[in-house]
Amino acid sequence: MFDAATSPGQNRAPRPPALPPAGRPRDAFFDNAKYLAIVLVAMGHSWEPLKGDSRVLEAAYCVVYAFHMPAFIIVSGYFSRNFDMRPDRLKRLVTGVVVPYVLFETAYSLFQRFVVGSDQDISLLDPWYLTWFLCALFVWRLTTPLWKAVRHPLPVAFGIAMLASVSPSIGDDLDLQRVLQFLPYFVLGLCLRPEHFRLVRRWPVRIAAVPVFALALAFAWWSVPRMNTEWFYHRDSAQELGAPWWCGPVMVLAMFGCSMLLTAGFFSWVPGRRTWFTALGAGTLYGYLLHGFVVKYGAHAGWFDPKWLHGPLGEILVTALAGGCVTLLCTRPVQRVFRFSMEPRMDWAFRRDAAEPARGREQGQEREPRSREMASA
């Protein structure tokens, strides 16, 4: 087609495009964010037996609870964007969410009965302690195709969350109050793109996050004796918290606004490069589900009872130990031991998907360069 060349080198065939890597590498930023969020979760749980004696610690507890689960849920929503009803993805939903939920809900119930000594019954409809997140993640991810089809998903999610906040009749089955009140954070994650995370990681946002967190701590310290901290858990309606019904929708919006400010500040401080804890981000589910046994056993065994632990030095020590414990539970040796319960293969339980080998070849195959076609043109 273009035979004439007016300058040297113009008749050369263009170089083929750079080939993408066979496998998509993990983004260090998200692994770092997941690890840091799960450390904050463990620290918050370790503060629960101590915070009643320290107004400062209770203020820090409120600030952490305002954004640590929203941040984790937003990242979960972001990585659920491509979920559909394809058989291989449904299989991963069952093996990665449903099976751990059943096993750990059962394990926590048996732990309560035989270790703590309470009359805890095994009930798969009433998530206990940490397992509510698995139940919620199952519902959220299963409804992802619907949210992708809705024209304005975030306002719809807000409407559902606000209605849930004024509906005490929902009850405790599947912890639906939390599922519905945390729904906007998951849907927001579905709507986000990589450029949105890059936007909050700019230096102006990092600098602005310092006064934002300082003001949040000051406000939390002021509000501790004046506010019911149960609002942060999103597990009860306004009426169940002893507030007028109209407080429910107002608090849903107010809590979302506060959470977004703090979550943006948190993301702005998360390093984007590989660090010593980046690899631990792949094991955050292990740390999340396993650290609950340590915290509950510690509370039962009286680990938090010594008076010196209720002072500043004791609180710092407990915080450091909680961070170290959950870090240990995210490591590869722990993952290998408990993989049977968190990531079981279970090929025996599913029919073979005829399209799966073809999809694997497509994903692993490099794109053929078009150099011949362009040269002949």
Image (tube, helix red, strand yellow):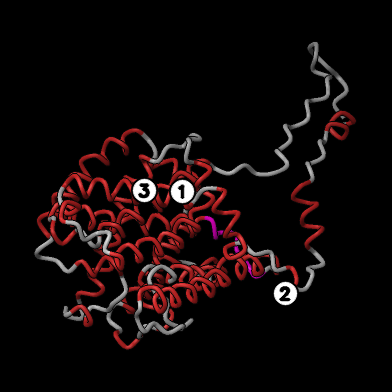
Above or below: residue 183 compared with residue 26: below
What label sits on residue 328 in the rendered view? Answer: 1
Residue type, label 3: Gly
Classify mark 1: helix, strand or loop: helix
From mark 3 to mark 1, how far is it between C-alphas?
9 Å
Q: Is residue 14 left or right of residue 267?
A: right
Answer with mark 1 or mark 2, whichever residue precedes in sequence.
Answer: 1
From mark 1 to mark 2, how far is it between C-alphas?
32 Å
User: Which quadrant is the C terminus positioned in?
Assistant: top right
Examine the image and state in which quarter residue 245 appears: bottom left
Above or below: residue 323 compared with residue 258: above
Nearer the viewer's eye, disc 2 or disc 3? 3
Q: Which residues are magenta?
A: 79-85
What label sits on residue 323 in the rendered view? Answer: 3
In depth, the one of 330 and 373 nearer the eye is: 330
At x 82% / y 67%, what residue is drawn? 354
Classify mark 2: helix, strand or loop: helix
At x 42% / y 84%, what residue is drawn? 121
In depth, the one of 286 and 359 nearer the eye is: 286
Nearer the viewer's eye, disc 1 or disc 2? 1
Answer with mark 3 or mark 1, whichever residue precedes in sequence.
Answer: 3
Residue type, label 2: Ala
Above or below: residue 252 compared with residue 205: below
Picture coordinates of residue 250 (x, y %)? 22, 70
Picture coordinates of residue 197 (x, y %)? 44, 45
Q: Is residue 133 left or right of residue 217?
A: right
User: Which quadrant is the N terminus positioned in?
Assistant: top right
Residue type, label 1: Leu
Answer with mark 2 or mark 3, whichever residue precedes in sequence.
Answer: 3
Is 326 contained in the magenta span?
no
Classify mark 3: helix, strand or loop: helix
